[in-house]
Amino acid sequence: MRQERRNYSRVLLKITGEGFCTENGFGIDLEQVRFLADEIVECIRTGKEIAVVVGGGNFIRGAITSEKTGLGRATADYMGMLATIINGMALQDTLEALDFETRLMSALTASDVAEPFIRRRCTRHLEKGRIVILVGGTGNPYFTTDTQAALRASEIRADVVLKATKVDGVYSADPMKDPSAERFDTISYQEVLDRKLEIMDSSAVELCARNAIPVLVFSLREKGNLLRALTGEKIGTLITA
Ligand code: UDP
């Protein structure tokens, strides 16, 4: 049965690495990170539980780097996972400067800067109102942080995956290239897969479908959108059964 948007309590927010830099930029832009932090803080203040999965594409995407440079795919993927730790540290520092309690949890061993990801510990942090930042991907090459988001959302029983992107939802075609592309208000997991809509990895969509976790695709570029998405306002595209 198709779900409607809801006022969610525990959410898994996936922020692509591109959210950490200026448009088409590289690396970290601290103004951007502050913007992300402000958005998250606004939601935490309303008592929501938020786990954030951080991408690394502002530094490196394994598949692309491997193809361009000739570096081995697994090596490039590990580099990509390390990049997510850099982004997570920037977000953590920025949130803590605003006086909010955070925990950085990594799937890759990085014990000097992050705790290991332990599911029960993660849910405990959330219950205590800490913002949990999940980095290091799944800890395995050949995956992406979208799959990590679907996996962790399933593990911590999140109500929804909030997938923050550059565009304001799922379109029938790439809206940057095709002006006649139409935006969906809701769409089924199966249709996303059948139409090969490249909004999220197919493995991530499948995992969310199997565990009945809705995915809300929305743009984080506009101020206040995260709270709107969280409280069930009709923004973005809801992917559900
Ligand atoms: N990555 C990986 N395994 C994972 C998650 C990420 O190998 O479980 C690597 C992969 O190379 C990926 C990069 O880390 O391209 C950065 O993650 P992603 O591309 O998902 O970041 P985003 O597109 O969200 O910025």
Image (cartoon, grey):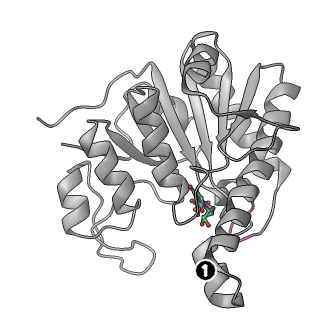
Q: Where residue 21 sits: x, y (%)?
A: 75, 59
- Verify whether residue 24 appears in magenta: yes
Q: What residue do we see at 46% from left, 52% from top?
A: 147
- Magenta stretch, main secondary structure class: loop
Residue in the foreground of this view, choosing between 95 and 181: 95
Q: What residue do we see at 62% from left, 77% from top?
A: 73
Residue 159: name its quadrant.
top left
Q: Where residue 62 sits: x, y (%)?
A: 63, 72
Tally the marks.
Answer: 1
- Verify whether residue 97 appears in magenta: no
Res 223 seen here: no
Q: What residue do we see at 71% from left, 83% from top?
A: 71
Does 200 sit above or below residue 114?
A: below
The residue labelled by disc 1 is 64
Does 15 sit above or below residue 124?
A: below
Residue 216: name its quadrant.
top left
Considering the numbered disc 1 on the image, is that residue within a helix, a strand or a loop? helix
Q: What residue do we see at 62% from left, 20% from top?
A: 121
Q: Where residue 149 sits: x, y (%)?
A: 49, 44
**Is the residue at mark 1 in contact range of ligand 1, meaning its CB lies under 8 Å from it?**
yes
What range of the chain is rendered magenta? 21-25
Does 114 sit above or below residue 67?
A: above
Quadrant of the image containing the C terminus? top left
Category of crowding for the residue at label 1, using alpha-carbon neighbours closer than 10 angstroms: few (below 14), some (14–19), many (at least 20): some
